[in-house]
Image (spheres, rainbow, N blue to C red):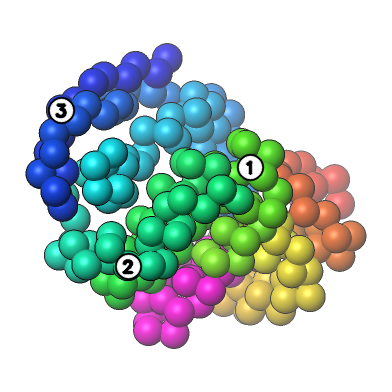
Amino acid sequence: MTKLSDQKKTCFICGEINVYKAIASTNRFGHADLDTRPPEMERSTIHCWIQRCPSCSYCAPDISDGPEVATKVVKSDDYLKQGDDSSYPELANKFLCWAIIKEAKGDNSSAGWAAVKAAWACDDANKESGAKESRKRAVALFEQARGYGTSFAEGLGAEEAILADLLRRSGQFDKVETVCQDGLEEGPEAMVKTILHFQQSLARRKDTGCYTVAEAVEFADGK
């Protein structure tokens, strides 16, 4: 069971005090998606993972904290445009605004995960275009992080497995094979290897659907 609570918080940017929903407790039943999205009931707490100040539009997982660069970023044209972009659900815009802040701070890994969560928000709202663009953005941010020598996932082949899912679900099938092969050459553990092979199979038939880790295992067992 999920329990939410109300918390008063002071905005890190403008100092306004507002009440925000917080997760008191939750749980998981089932298996995570291939892009790590948790199953229910935690899955449906996504609206509590990001907060937005109604006064200055600062977005952050914790509205009372943040990097100093945020004070300038929240006034930038890119940030303001993203915050009001009607082609995305409001929740996705919050995550994408946070991604802009984290990218400005130089934390491309965290920015990439914020974009992934924006894609999940788009999925829930049946905004296919927004989900696709959010995943493309996540790929770009993760690749930038890797270019700077920063990891965004733990374990051999794990980053490639996540990139493969983002690429496939955004329709970039031609890149999936190479990414998966790179991951397999790292000598990953059995589960990651299974997922990489599953991603290759899905990409070859141009499948952009959402699948769980359990479905990847079923695929391997059925071979």
Q: Which mark is residue 8?
A: 3
| Quadrant in which the N terminus is drawn | top left
Q: Position of residue 214 (x, y in %)?
A: 67, 40
User: Tag 1: Cα neighbours inside 10 Å, few (<14), some, or many (≥20)?
Assistant: some
Three-letter residue code for mark 2 = Ser
Disc 3 to disc 1: CB gap under 8 Å: no
Disc 1 to disc 2: CB gap under 8 Å: no
Q: Please identify, in this view, whether the residue under mark 1 or under mark 2 is nearer the observer.
A: 2
Element type at marker 3? strand
Three-letter residue code for mark 1 = Asp
Residue 215 as seen in the image, left or right of residue 151: right
| Residue at which label 1 appears | 123
> In the rendered structure, which segment of residues is drawn in magenta?
139-165
In this rendering, is residue 111 above or below 21?
below
| Residue at which label 2 appears | 76
Q: Residue at x 13, y 39 (%)?
A: 16
Three-letter residue code for mark 3 = Lys
Element type at marker 1? helix
Q: Main secondary structure of the magenta part?
A: helix
Q: Position of residue 4 (x, y in %)?
A: 32, 19
What is the distance, in whole Å, between disc 1 and disc 2 at their CAs? 27 Å
Q: Please identify, in this view, whether the residue under mark 3 or under mark 1 is nearer the observer.
A: 3
Q: Position of residue 94 (x, y in %)?
A: 41, 48
Residue 104, located in which quarter of the rendered image?
bottom left
Q: Nearer the viewer, residue 221 or 180?
A: 180
Q: Nearer the viewer, residue 187 or 79?
A: 79
Q: Position of residue 15 (x, y in %)?
A: 10, 44
In the image, is residue 207 part of the stretch drawn in magenta? Answer: no
Q: Would residue 113 be seen by someone viewing this image from the given angle?
A: no
What is the distance, in whole Å, between disc 2 and disc 3 at their CAs? 27 Å
Residue 184 as seen in the image, left or right of residue 36: right
Disc 2 to disc 3: CB gap under 8 Å: no
